[in-house]
Amino acid sequence: MAPEAARIAVIGIHGHGASHVLNAGRVGRLVAVVDPRPPQPQTPAADDDVRWFTDLDSLLAADLALDVAVLCTPLHTHAAMTTTLLRAGLDVLLEKPPTTTLAEFEALLAVSAETGRLCQVGFQSLGSQALERVDQLVASGAIGTVSHLGAVGTWVRRRAYWQRAAWAGKRSLDGRPVVDGVITNPLAHATATALRLAGARRAVDVTSIDLALFRANDIEADDTSSVRIETEAGPTVIGAFTLCAETERPPSVTVYGSTGSIRLDYTLDRVHWTHDGGTVTTEHERSDLLADLIAARTDGTALLNPLADNGAFMRVMEAVRTAPDPQPIPSAYVRWEGEGLDAHPIVPGIDAALARVADEDVALHRVVKFSTSWSRLRA
Ligand SMILES: NC(=O)c1ccc[n+]([C@@H]2O[C@H](COP(=O)([O-])OP(=O)(O)OC[C@H]3O[C@@H](n4cnc5c(N)ncnc54)[C@H](O)[C@@H]3O)[C@@H](O)[C@H]2O)c1
């Protein structure tokens, strides 16, 4: 007899959660959704056999014999809601970033251990088999001795992105940490993927973090930043990110070696190995993190991204949370394009500057000073 499909609830369904609603029906049975706002008509969340609740307590009170919850709510709600779900006996796919403070993360780890429930963190790039390809190439000496890893992300985000929710672009909201900056949220996969390739999983695997945080948007958090992370046993990880790019490109993580380099385009599961002047490109499959969580419930296999393996990323989150506010980029170095909610800032020259930060292992504030030296660099 085929095993019964896992009974799933998705919490937070309108933003990125809409993709989880679709996926839940593919890999299990969507039983309920939770959101203060009703499901959109003609979506799977609005189906007759899917119950809608406006809050988590009503979901749990309904006693629906749930197996798994997918939590896709604002960052500052993750710790408390995941704690409630684990204590209610559910296994959880928790959207990234796991929590907004390191203390909350450690408390959540304790709850997961105490309840024996599983918690997978939704960095979907960590389900890619492209990571194994990179690991194998490095281990075989394909690029010689590794010097460092560089993650680069050049994205464009419009005003509508920052205005979609009260928490967007905030460092804190009503006294609660949010930490919605480019390093910790929109391009968080880049740092998380680079840390994983560098072998840094636990908080203790990170020995030091240097940040350069800037913003061109009228927000609290950073939108143009660099981060340099020293790891205990592996190479240094550099991250160089902006949401104010000249040209949006797929973000990447590059492993730099003495005889070549390996670039992983992690949103495309594509690996480019460059050596002796030639490049070999391969494409890879990706495992779904919810399917992986459901499989782990029955066969006891290790999760692809268990909560505990996000400690190194949480050290970065904590460093950004406790850093001074990002420096505003003077308007002379910012160009705006578009109108109204479509408008977005561009920092001319930033794409090349960030590539240099990652290639050369140099901090963003050394490459750009947003003064006369920035003009010289651009010339
Ligand atoms: N893995 C990815 O690629 C990816 C991409 C985008 C966003 N995310 C993550 O998804 C999460 C949500 O981000 P978003 O951009 O969709 O946010 P959003 O604010 O656009 O959407 C959040 C949803 O949660 C609902 N919500 C708010 N408070 C709630 C509560 N207490 N109970 C139930 N529902 C509640 C909102 O009504 C909304 O439907 C974040 O953790 C974000 O980092 C992940």
Image (spheres, grey):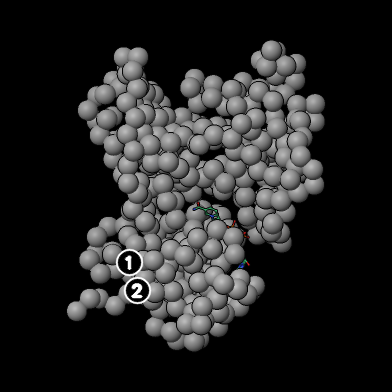
Q: In this rendering, is residue 99 above or below 41? A: above
The answer to whether residue 250 is left or right of residue 258 is right
Placement of 144 over or under 329, stated as above or below = above
Q: Is residue 57 visible?
A: no
Q: Residue at x 22, y 28 (%)?
A: 140
Mark 1 lies on residue: 294
Q: Residue furthest left?
A: 1
> The N terminus lies in which quarter of the figure?
bottom left
Image quadrant of ligand 1 equals bottom right
**Viewport quadrant of the C terminus:** top right
CA distance separating discs 2 and 1: 7 Å
In-image side of 339 versus 1 (left or right): right
Secondary structure found at label 1: helix
Residue 193's quadrant in the figure?
top left
Residue at 40% x, 34% y: name it: 264
Image-quadrant location for residue 351: top right
Above or below, 144 relative to 27: above
Local packing at callout 1 (Cα closer than 10 Å; few below 14, some 14-19, many 20+) is many
Q: Position of residue 332 (x, y in %)?
A: 80, 26
Looking at the rendered structure, the number of numbered marks drawn on it comes to 2
One can see residue 335 in this view: yes
According to the picture, the residue beneath numbered tag 2 turns out to be: 6
Instruction: Tell me the amino acid under the disc marked 1.
Output: Ile
Q: Which mark is residue 196?
A: none
Q: Are marks 2 and 1 in contact (CB under 8 Å)?
A: yes
Q: Position of residue 252 (x, y in %)?
A: 46, 34
Q: Amino acid at mark 2?
A: Ala
Q: Secondary structure at mark 2?
A: loop
- The residue most toward the front is 42
